[in-house]
Amino acid sequence: MEDNQRFVLEQTHEVSNRKHILVIDDDLNMLKTLRYYLQDAYKVTVVNSGKLAVDFLLKYTPDLILLDYMMPMFNGAAVLKIIKSREATKDIPVYFLTGQTDKSTVMECLSLKPAGYIVKPVAKDALLEKMARAFAK
């Protein structure tokens, strides 16, 4: 992932009129899939940990964040709290991504007040529709 990450982070320096989405997930296959789904319509940066996401957000401000809820060490809830605590990032819409559909996890996710909640796996068309609606607001 490290080489991929460097490549993707370098791409964020491009000048683009496209909206920029940061995808944070510890699953390499999920990162590849989401980047593939989104790359034709959006500028996409992927990182595979909450720590890398926070580091990235110190330098860049994406238009929207897709954040895996269940990650080791630095989970989605911790990352969202940091995002919401910083003036520069507090207004970025954050959508949780999770494979967890049990009521307690859903309620825990929603209690953190993300912009939305997406259940994995997500179909390409459904994800693109959700992103289009998010940017239409």
Image (spheres, rainbow, N blue to C red):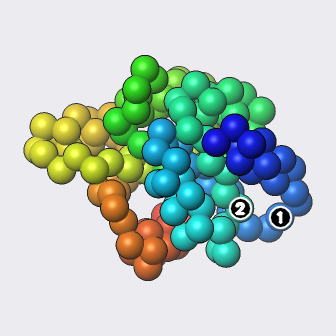
Number of numbered markers: 2
Choose between 9 and 104: the one closer to the eye.
9
Q: Where, quadrant-wise, is the N terminus in this rendering?
A: top right
Q: CA distance from mark 1 to mark 2?
A: 8 Å
* Residue where numbered disc 1 is placed: 16
Q: Residues within 10 Å of mark 1 (few under 14, many from 20)?
A: few
Q: Can you see residue 13?
A: yes
* Residue 122 tag number: none
Q: Can you see residue 133?
A: no
Residue at 60 percent of width and 34 percent of height: 53
Percent of width and height locating residue 72: 40, 26
* Residue 43 tag number: 2
Residue at 30 percent of width and 57 percent of height: 119
Going from the N terminus, do you reach mark 1 or mark 2 first? Answer: 1
Percent of width and height locating residue 47: 61, 41
Please indicate whether residue 58 sits to the left or right of residue 84 in the image. Answer: right
Choose between 101 and 91: the one closer to the eye.
101
Q: Considering only vertical position in the picture, is 51 above or below 68?
A: above
Percent of width and height locating residue 124: 45, 74
Q: Residue furthest bottom?
A: 125
* Image marks 1 and 2: residues in contact by CB distance under 8 Å: yes
Residue at 34 percent of width and 36 percent of height: 70
SS state under label 1: loop
Mark 1: amino acid = Ser
Percent of width and height locating residue 56: 70, 34
Q: Residues within 10 Å of mark 2 (few under 14, many from 20)?
A: many
SS state under label 2: strand
Residue at 65 percent of width and 74 percent of height: 41
Mark 2: amino acid = Lys
